[in-house]
Image (cartoon, grey):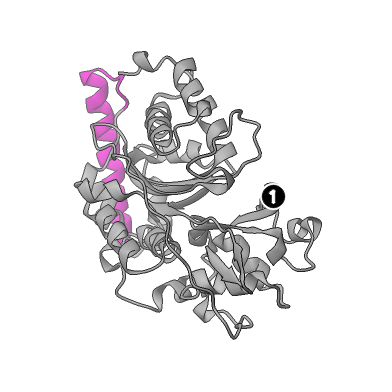
Amino acid sequence: MAQMSGSVTKITRPVPNLALDSTANNDVKLFLGACANTTIERALTEFSARLCYNSVSKMGTSENFIPKVLSSGHLSVAEHASIMLPWSLMGKLGARKIFEWNRYFDFPPGRVAGNLRCWIELMRMGGYYPFHEVLLSVFGDIYASESFVHPTELHEWSEEAGFRVPSAEGAGPHVYLLAVNYGTFGMSKRPTTVRDKEWARYTWMVENVSRSLTHQLVRHRGASFSQESQRYVDFEKSAATKQYGDFIYPPGLNFGQQDMTRYAYMQSVEHYKDLRKSGVKKEDARFVLPNGTTTRMIVSFSFNELSHFLTVRCAKDAQWEIRSLAKIMLQQAAMATPHEIFSNLKEGFEIADWG
């Protein structure tokens, strides 16, 4: 909570998954370590950006990294951190005006919810409003490079406890629930229908998946995504391919079909190498790489968007790879926020049949 002029203002922000300390994934451990040394908003933003540029090993080594990334226009990495404030802090700003500026804000009863990018763009509109003080007290290190009006008094912030949800590191997708902003229903109040307007936000890191899967994933437009870049990261240096292998094979292939697929894939890799040696840029050489190439991504869902995603992607007629990812996400979300919606989805999709 933040102290405002003698009164208490309730604010919700992300909390980390403390079970990440038991994972074998060193990059995820670096994220959790960053949460202990800075604000979780800064940790989520830096981790997302460094995953895109394959520099996670440098987490926390440069105070200028986040301001440099944001000033370059790469604001999508700021969409994974989120905060919700009461209307009392919005001054004379009305919902219609805010929505005109940025349609990705959400409006639970009596509150305004948005990711860090939403708030940055709102603050860039100029003027001064009471919410500036709270945002600067929470995101001050991220906003350091912005030309905002700084208040004379910053408000103290008390951290909420984290939660513990085990990661999935089996043969299929590797799935790590990084953080959850519980929104207005918190740990004690749960929504009971998918149509509830209560607000929450979930952030995952997903690895050992194909670009075919992520092409499907980004169709869910209400979510936010940060993916390892083939434009800036050379394929041969990709962290995704080094950790998990360079290609995802469809499970329905027989041995002969697997050999044919492998041969076609290796040919594309050789063409990529030849193009790079001849001076072709990474952003152009990547055109020869197939959809089955291994990748990794950070994805954030609002509660309502996650409910929709799980409804359509856990269904038996969903494509096999994204269905396997959705099933894991459903299980992890149900552990983090064990309310009726997730329980009903698990029952509806016959969890006993999942294996």
**242 w.r.t. 69: above or below:** above
Instruction: List x then y, in percent, for residue 282.
Output: 37, 59
Instruction: List x then y, in percent, for residue 315.
Output: 49, 20
Residue 152 falls within the magenta-colored stretch: no
Instruction: List x then y, in percent, for residue 347.
Output: 46, 17
Give 113 or 240, whichever is nearer the viewer. 113
* Residue at image point 37% right, 28% down: 324
Residue 269 falls within the magenta-colored stretch: yes
Give 199 or 123, whichever is nearer the viewer. 199
Give 253 or 181, whichever is nearer the viewer. 181
Left or right, residue 327 beside residue 151 = left
Residue that carries the numbered disc 1 in the rendered image: 107
* Residue at image point 45% right, 37% down: 337
**Disc 1 residue type (three-letter):** Phe
Q: For the magenta stretch, what is the residue range?
A: 250-277
Residue 55 in sight from this viewpoint = no
* Residue at image point 35% right, 37% down: 292
